[in-house]
Structures are given as structure tokens and as C-alpha cells.
Amino acid sequence: MLSPRQAIGNIPSYHPPLAGREGLRLDFNENTDTCSPRVLERLRSLRPEELTRYPEREPLEAAVAEFMKVSAREVLLTNGVDEAIHLLCQVYLDRGDEAIIVVPTYSMYAIYARATGSEVIRVRADQDFRFPMAQLRRSITPRTRLIAIANPNNPTGSVVAVDELLEIARLAPQAAVLIDEAYFEFYGKTILERRREARNVFVARTFSKAYGMAGLRLGVLVGDADQMWAVRRACSPYNVNAVALACLPDALADQEYVQAYVSEVLAGRARLERALQAGAVQHWPSEANFLLLRVGPAKEDAVAFVEQMRRRGILVRDRSADEGCAGCVRISLGRREHVTRLLYALGDVFEELGIAQGVSLL
Ligand SMILES: Cc1ncc(COP(=O)(O)O)c(C=O)c1O
């Protein structure tokens, strides 16, 4: 009888609640509104031959390289950051190797690493989700072949200084060190300019968040040219679809749109923070387009909260299953009017569930 490889059977199942996401979607850290109007215009102007041809990635890699001020040999366009993670696991991890992640974090690191048959070392974040530098240093062994760090991290919104990231990369020269900057546009700080200080550093970016193009699946992986040939070899030549590639120049050209959206998100995040402070609801500082808060001590509290929000037409994400996140919910920020809707609903739900009473959240 046919059976999958053992490593695949060992992957814990992961079912993001993707079905029937009706309402205001603040559950996946997507852009809550739209992508740039220039991208929409380009979509409307697509010609049939742009679809009949196989996609040509390279000219667009040159454009992205210029935008990011890196060389084209250092850049690979990917089917979202997810594919970049998948490729790094394929290229660097063998059965018996170790991949280190700092938890709680983005689920796909562990999933793709486990699929290779390697061992995933989960280093717990320090108090208040601070970066566990000392513990991470101690976790590096000669078998460490991948270290994946989201900066800012999901679901906590916490960050780590570039100096610390470089120190980790130097301590593990035999490992690929992925710095996942999916939320870069909301944070503004990057390791990119200093990537050459450690040749094993890879940087990932995405068009799924600030750019509002999650459905097109477009990510960027930057790494040392002496490594990227290997990543390219493991990658399909047609991994990024022609529609995404066609839209890319307009997406990059409209930085005004990205900046305006980011400013609105940051203002919304500050509003939500003020509201949570007023209600004495525990939450953690975030450098991304979302905020993690605790609505009670247990998973049931988070489940009840998510359900009450859903009844008011707003989707938020229960993160109770993540390490140290019992009773926690992650809420994405977006356009001003969406944050206003969120705050109205939050006030109601806090009152109803007795989380915070009589506070004006607006
Ligand atoms: C840290 C992090 N990396 C990567 C991704 C996925 O990005 P993409 O849509 O480019 O695959 C997410 C999405 O939530 C994320 O939070």
C-alpha cells in the first residue's frame, strides 16, 4: 500500500481557518483594503499572450534587485515567502540536521523543516516574548543547518536588533540564517544593508502584507550569490505566475500607495494600543500590522472572544495554541474605518464577556 514518507506523517497538521472568511478580515495580517490602483489597472490590461506564455522571472528579478539595491544574482522571486522557506529547507536540511526556531512564531518554518526529516529545535521566547538571545546561542550545535527568525515576529510583533541577528549568523556559519522580514514595511528596520557581514544570511520580503497582494503570491528571497545558485537549482523556473510578474513593476513604482497604507495601519495600531491600555487588557508592543492581546487565562476565553467578534462581522485569530499564548488573540490593523469598526465591536465584546467594562475604546 502506498504511504507517505515518515517525515511527512510526523508533521503536525496545520489548518489555518481559511474557509468562509466573511466579514472584516483581521485574522491573517492581510491588507484590509486593496492593492495599489496601478496594480488593478495593470490587471485589467492583461493581454491573452501574457497568459499563454510561460512566465519570465528574470527581467523582474533585475527590477526588484534595483529597487532593493542588491545585485540580481542575489535575488530570487518566490511564490510568497512560504516558498522561500520551503526552498531553504530543501537546500540546506537533511535527515538528522537541526533547524532552530524561536517560538511562538510563524508555523511554516517548522512544517517545511519537519518535512525534510530534520529535527526542529523550538527555543522559547523570554518573558514578554523578548528575543531569547542567550538560549538561542546555547541551542546552536554543529548539526544546526537552518535558523529561521521572523523580524518582526508573528504572532507577537516583537523584534530583534540587527547586531544580534548577525551575531547568531556568525555563531552558526554552517547554517542558513533566514531573517523573514514579511512585515518590514511596518517596522522600517532591516538587516539587508548589512547582510554581507555574514554570508549565510538570507532575507525574505513579501508583497502579501503592506502591498495588498496576498492572492497573487509574490515574495523575494535575497542571499549571497554563492548560495543563491543552489536555491535557484531547487526551484521551478515557473514558480511565480505571469499575472504576479506583470503586476510587480507597478506595485514597486507606487510607493506612495504603500507609504499611505502603512501610515494608516500605524495610526490604527496606536489607537488599538490606547484602547487596550484604557481597558487594562494585557497586550504586547508590536512593530507589525497586528497586535497580540490576552482576553483571559485560557483557550476557552479566546474561543469565546473570537466567536463574539465573528457575530459582529469581524474575524480575528485565536493564537491560544502557540507557546505562552493561552487566552491570546491576534488582531490585524488596517484602514482607519476598519480600525474604527474594530474598536466599536471590541468595546461591545469586552463588555459582554466581562474583559473590560465601561471603557470607551474610541
Ligand atoms: C512571518 C511570516 N512570514 C511569511 C508569511 C507568509 O508570507 P507569504 O504570503 O509571502 O507567503 C507570513 C504570513 O502570515 C508571516 O507572518
Image (cartoon, rainbow, N blue to C red):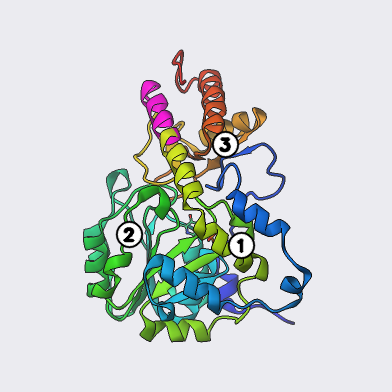
**Front residue of 72 and 208:** 72
**Front residue of 146 and 167:** 167
**Front residue of 185 and 235:** 185
**Front residue of 283 and 34:** 34
Residue where numbered disc 1 is placed: 247
Q: Secondary structure at mark 1?
A: helix
Q: In the image, is residue 258 above or below residue 46? A: above
Residue type at mark 3?
Val
Question: In the rendered view, does 181 fall on the left or right side of 213?
Answer: left
Residue where numbered disc 2 is placed: 190
Residue where numbered disc 3 is placed: 303
Can residue 96 be seen?
no
Residue type at mark 2?
Thr
Task: Please provide the residue range marked out in magenta.
Answer: 268-280
- In percent of width and height, residue 22 lies at 70, 40
Crowd tier of the residue under label 3, counting other residues whose Cα lies within 10 Å: few below 14, some 14–19, many 20 or above: some
Can residue 4 be seen?
yes
Mark 2 vs mark 3: give the one in front.
2
Instruction: Name the residue at 47% across, 36% down.
Output: 298
